[in-house]
Amino acid sequence: MKRTKLIAILALVLIAAMLLAGCSNGAQKPSSSTDDNKVYTFKIDYPNPENSGAYIALTEWSQMLKEQSNGRLDMQICANGQLGSIKDCVSNCVGGLTDGFWSAMTIYAGLYRPAEALTLPMMGVHNADVASATLTAMLEQTDYYTESLSNLYVVTLHSATTMPIGFKDSTPVTSMADLKGLNMRVTGGFNSNWVTAIGANPINAGSNEGYEYLEKGIINSYLYDWDKIQSGALLEQTGYIVDAHCCASELLFCLNKDKYDALPDDLKAIIDGSQQWFRDRIGQIYAEQRDEMVAKAEAAGITVAPISDEFNAELTAAAEEVWAAWIQEMNEAGYDGQGIFDKTREFIEYYNGVYNYYN
């Protein structure tokens, strides 16, 4: 009897210990920052060719995240539109068909209206760093961009080099009178109105269509940033360039928000910590790329002429009417058009002083 009773008592003690252990495990849930050894794969839609500047930055970013996460973040950059049409980058990502994308905001008409202010002509942006810092400040220090980007995780907003005016012919262009009647590639939107105001005919052409349009004579001048001049081999169809700082691009690099939110906290922290690195790196790449392309143009006998103060003033005066029209349209659409415009200009002026160089 004593042995039986002892066994019974031991059994009760064991059961009690197991129950206590079970409660303890339930109260101490695994931390979401614990290394779970799971690999999280993101397929990132990159619509442009692999020889473009952003692709370099994206692949370096991907490798950096892989190393920092001990292989748990696998960011696969899919170039040349492998994951779909460039026009579907945003909807594919929001809908979960892709895990992220890099693209230009101006492609998606109506989606990112407040950010259009940066892309208006002759806003005085000196370089890619200024434009990128302005977009970031507008996102982080105001609520103007909040609603339109709420369905995405924004890795970063950034910009490329400001756009010069390229010409197929080698004849010097020194004033607005020399632009009359030219067919000029534009980025669309209010920049088309500005091209009309400076005497040229606006022609909408995609980011990858410049070479074909120049070769076929559909356009004889263009607005493209230096990155696209390189990746599109546009120097082969160019005779003269006015190094005006006409327009800045607005580029966005985002991830699917639900997929980002589902990551462990330590992996989120790695991605969050990469944002400034990406902006700095892409700015460096664009600046080096611009210098390289200018050197190649000059070696090929293509003049890259600085814009005179008089010519710049003419182009800016023509842009002022476009600015006013944009502000009015934004106000009518329910936005604070003047407030967005003024704040954008304020940040541009500030960051021109921080990044005090031209490219």
Image: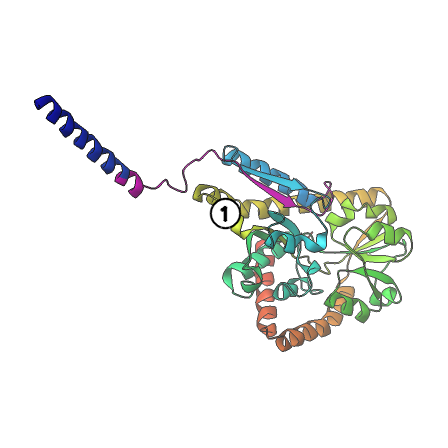
* Element at label 1: helix
Q: Residue furthest left?
A: 2
Residue 195, image x and y in percent?
80, 66
Identify which residue is drawn at 53% across, 52% down.
257
Magenta-highlighted residues: 23-52
Tag 1: amino acid: Asp
Q: Decide: is 72 above or below 259.
A: above
Q: Decide: is 16 above or below 181.
A: above
Q: Mark 1, residues whose alpha carbon is within 10 Å: few (<14), some, or many (≥20)?
A: some
Q: Quadrant of residue 326?
A: bottom right
Q: Residue furthest front?
A: 1
Residue 103, image x and y in percent?
67, 52
Residue 34 on the magenta span: yes
If the image is split into quadrants, where does the N terminus sit? top left
Q: Quadrant of residue 296?
A: top right
Any part of residue 159 in sight:
no
Residue 123 on the magenta span: no
Q: Most prominent secondary structure in the magenta stretch? A: loop
Instruction: Report whether 55 appears left or right of 177.
Output: left
Q: Decide: is 305 above or below 315.
A: above
Identify which residue is drawn at 47% across, 33% down.
37
Residue 15, image x and y in percent?
21, 33
How many numbered tags mark residues here?
Answer: 1
Mark 1 lies on residue: 272
Q: Quadrant of residue 247?
A: bottom right
Any part of residue 299 in sight:
yes
Q: Depth check: 342 or 139 in front?
A: 139
Q: Depth check: 1 or 159 in front?
A: 1
Identify which residue is drawn at 67% across, 75% down.
329
